[in-house]
Amino acid sequence: MSEIKKIKHRLCARHIGVLPTDKIYTNLIKQAILMTLKSEHVDMPCAVSVLITNDEGIKKYNNDYRGVNKPTDVLSFPMHNFIGHGWSNIVNLDIDMDTQTVQLGDIVISISTIKRNARRYGHSIEQETTRMIIHSALHLLGYDHGREMRSKELALMRYMGFTDDK
């Protein structure tokens, strides 16, 4: 009987400028990233860093890296190039010899914008947070906006117990 290999991913979450009550979303964020990696059959230990911040914090990143001087909901900073999308299309795989992980990239999320968007779309904060983290994690794996990415987002949302596809 073959043994199922358990992959140990490293997820680091930091908080800057958020209320102590907003830190409760950290576990949800980690769960959404892990489910996304699992669904994409990521078969090596990976590291993802997440900064949970407010509108002021994400506005600075948005301006510095995209030249857009306003807040947004989430930003993705992939560390690898892909020849398509998905884990199997990663090129120049760089393994950190100290941690034996592949650094996939960084995610910056504004809980302030997430809360506003949740109200606007009629979602819970948990649903909107999960949706945006899945979206961002797929970007780290080389996906770009399109039908396939949206289909994967919806499937993962349903798998995580969110049935409203708004």
Image: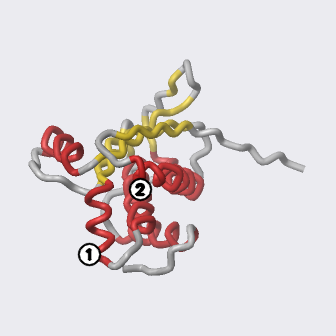
**Disc 2: which residue:** 133
What secondary structure is found at the residue carrying circle 1? Answer: helix
Q: Residue at x 39, y 45 (%)?
A: 82
- Indicate left or right for 41 with 129 as reference: right
Q: Residue at x 40, y 47 (%)?
A: 20
For marks 1 and 2, the one nearer the N-term is 1
Quarter occupied by residue 147: bottom left
Q: Residue at x 19, y 46 (%)?
A: 56
Percent of width and height locating residue 140: 40, 47
Evaluate whether residue 126 shows in this view: yes
Q: Nearer the viewer, residue 32 or 100?
A: 32
Q: Nearer the viewer, residue 112 or 75?
A: 112
> Marks 1 and 2, Cα distance to the nearest angstrom?
18 Å
Q: Residue furthest right?
A: 1
Q: Is residue 138 depicted above or below 119 in this figure?
A: above
Q: Confirm or deny contact between disc 1 and disc 2 (CB under 8 A).
A: no
Q: Amino acid at mark 2?
A: Ile
Percent of width and height locating residue 10: 55, 36
Percent of width and height locating residue 138: 42, 55
Quarter of the image where the C terminus is located: bottom left
Q: Nearer the viewer, residue 43 or 103?
A: 103
**Disc 1: which residue:** 120
Evaluate whether residue 149 shows in this view: no
What secondary structure is found at the residue carrying circle 2? Answer: helix
- Indicate left or right for 48 with 160 as reference: left
- Indicate left or right for 143 with 28 as reference: left
Of circles 1 and 2, the one toward us is 1
- Indicate left or right for 2 with 5 as reference: right
Quarter occupied by residue 117: bottom left
Q: Determine crowd level at label 2: few under 14, some 14-19, many 20+ residues with C-alpha closer than 10 A.
A: many
Q: Residue at x 45, y 65 (%)?
A: 126
